Image: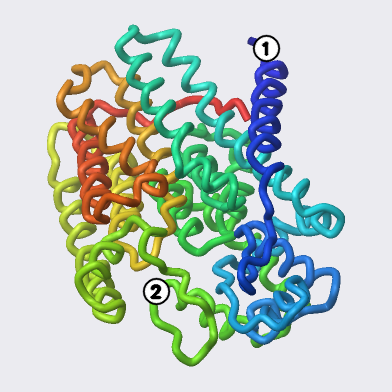
Amino acid sequence: MPNFTSKFLLLSISLLISIFIITPLNLIEIDNGTLIMSDFANYVTHIGEFWFNGKINLYDLATQEEINSSIAGFEVIGALPLGITPIATFVFLPFSLIAQYDLKISQICWVTISLYLFLSTIFHPLILIFKKNSFRERAIILTVLTIGLNSAVMYVSITLGQTSLIAAALILQLLILTRSPRNNLYTICSFVCLSIKPTYAIFGAAILIAQGRFKTVLLGLCTCIILTLIFTFFAGTSWPTEYLENIMTFSNHVNYKSYQNPFLSGTSNVIRNILVDYWSAEYALKISQILFYLGLAIVMIGATIVVLFQKNYKIDSQKYLYLSITFIYFYLLFATYVGFYEDLILFALMFYTLKVTIDSEVKPFSKGLLLLSLFTSFLVFNFAFLQNCPSIIFWFSKLILILSFQIILFSRLKSLKIPTIQSNV
């Protein structure tokens, strides 16, 4: 298939899916006196007010309440915290401009671009897998893609206009892009785009550092600093404190502000979601924080020891890439708050693991391990549609799924090579 044709086809598919899902939605509505907005609508309305209407205190609660009250037509007390960074004000700027005229078209454009990047990232590796491998490998990868692409996590990410879809695409691209002048520039842009949220930026930096791409990280950070300084010129110097109050809402109880706690049981498949079923929200938070910081130290130290003391192969970036993937997996399990739509990042890491494993000339997957992985991936990615089951079932399914793919990756660590695939973006 010609390069242009494949791009046009994937873009058309992305546009049609976006139109089909988003057109029937009410992105902003009033329900029993409560203002309800999609995440994308929340982002672009506030960013639009910042750029076009002089609401410079983007992260200030009073300003957010004023904007929400203007949208609702009545006084709104409280606001959802804005977890996006100042970099996001530049990324969302064109979509905020479109939203001034039609919010729904703006979200369709955002989702179309995000979905296109995701599909185009997996398209070229998928074609190579089909050319070089047997029916068994083709069936494995197609089954995983079918489960992920037709899941609740994908549907909800599209309806909310969430950033997780583009984050999953960019993280996967960082894992498979080769080094070249064109790709180096593209990688810097990808890192800057990932910086719309702190966690995405950390994930991107971890992957690039693991690959030894220090110059790329440095240039990306410099770009982010320049954009942040431009933002500060308009927003003033008080925004860092206000921004910290916003993001701390995702990991602590903020009693001194009227921010709505973003954590609700059933919206996040992390350990904290289980704990709130047995303890108060306060104790669940404290226990999950202890588990996260203590567990992170144990996992990273243990993984480092295991990798450094492996024998029979050279010390190279494969080991450090393994550590970066381990870190992301751990975050998705134990962070105090991770929206279930962020599991699209887990899906991207699964695809990468399957791709490099199938590419390596090693023994095929264990049948039992493969079936277990497929079953648990169905539960994890459809968490939002299957909430009648106890939370503990979904979290342990996620744990088993991650451990299964860690076993697959670790067992082939000696033979895996960093893919040399030219992304078809």
Is 234 placed left or right of 333 in the picture?
Answer: right
Comparing labels 1 and 2, the label whose residue is closer to the camera = 2
Question: Where 123 falls versus 75 (above or below)?
Answer: above
Q: Which residue is mark 2?
A: 251
- Nearer the observer, 284 or 27: 27
Where residue 407 appears, as percent x and y from the top left, is 19, 36
Q: Could one spot residue 233 in this view of the protein?
A: no
Residue found 29% across the figure and 81% down from its top: 282
Which quadrant holds residue 50?
bottom right
The residue carrying pointer 1 sits among few (fewer than 14), some (14 to 19) or many (20 or more) residues within 10 Å by Cα, namely few
The residues tagged by marks 1 and 2 sit, at their Cα atoms, a distance apart of 48 Å
Count of picture labels: 2
Residue 2 circle label: 1
Question: Where 234 falls versus 189 (above or below)?
Answer: below
Residue found 65% across the figure and 61% down from its top: 88
Give the structural element (helix, strand or loop) at label 2: loop
The residue carrying pointer 2 sits among few (fewer than 14), some (14 to 19) or many (20 or more) residues within 10 Å by Cα, namely some
Residue found 21% across the figure and 75% down from its top: 279
- Nearer the observer, 93 or 265: 265
Identify the amino acid type marked 2.
Ser
